[in-house]
């Protein structure tokens, strides 16, 4: 089973979702990519897909801005569930 990638809100870190691991150990509480090569939500989604090696069907979620990026990721990856 592939893990669930959770993206934090803008300005937050993966620590935002780290507490969920006690109930759902397959969660990846991600930090934002250090790569400054993005200017739009769509470009950031592409960076995240590459950085986290996401593929169609992988579960993605996020809080606040992370949810917006997660929604864009699932738009690019057919069959990927979205958790907000």
Image (cartoon, rainbow, N blue to C red):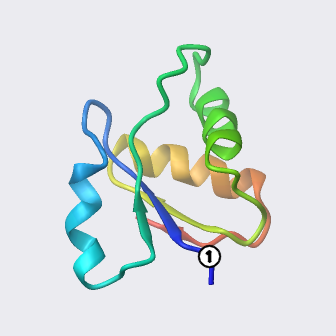
Q: Residue at x 55, y 20 (%)?
A: 35
Residue 53 shown left or right of residue 2 in the figure: right
- Percent coordinates x, y for residue 61 in the rendering: 47, 61
- Percent coordinates x, y for residue 32 in the rendering: 43, 35
Establish if 67 lies above or below 60.
above
Between residues 79 and 35, which one lies in front from this camera angle?
A: 35
Report the number of numbered marks: 1
**Which residue is tagged 1?**
2
Rendered-image quadrant of the N terminus: bottom right
Q: Residue at x 58, y 16 (%)?
A: 39
Rendered-image quadrant of the C terminus: bottom left
Q: Residue at x 27, y 85 (%)?
A: 23
Between residues 67 and 20, which one lies in front from this camera angle?
A: 20
- Helix, strand or loop status at disc 1: loop
Crowding at label 1, few (<14), some or many (≥20) Cα neighbours within 10 Å?
few
Quadrant of the image occupied by residue 54: bottom right
Residue 64 shown left or right of residue 2 in the figure: left
- Percent coordinates x, y for residue 53 in the rendering: 70, 51
- Percent coordinates x, y for residue 18 in the rendering: 25, 61
Q: Residue at x 33, y 53 (%)?
A: 63
Establish if 66 lies above or below 59.
above
Establish if 48 lies above or below 79.
above
Residue 49 shown left or right of residue 29 in the figure: right
Between residues 55 and 68, which one lies in front from this camera angle?
A: 55
Establish if 41 lies above or below 66.
above
């Amino acid at each position: 089973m592939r893990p669930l990638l959770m993206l934090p809100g803008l300005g937050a870190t993966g620590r935002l979702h780290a507490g969920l691991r006690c109930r759902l150990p397959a969660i990846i509480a991600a930090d934002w990519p250090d790569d400054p090569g993005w200017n739009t939500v769509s470009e950031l989604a592409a960076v995240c897909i590459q950085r986290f090696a996401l593929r169609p069907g992988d579960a993605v979620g996020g809080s606040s801005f992370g949810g917006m990026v997660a929604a864009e990721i699932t738009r690019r990856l057919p069959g990927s569930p979205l958790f907000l």
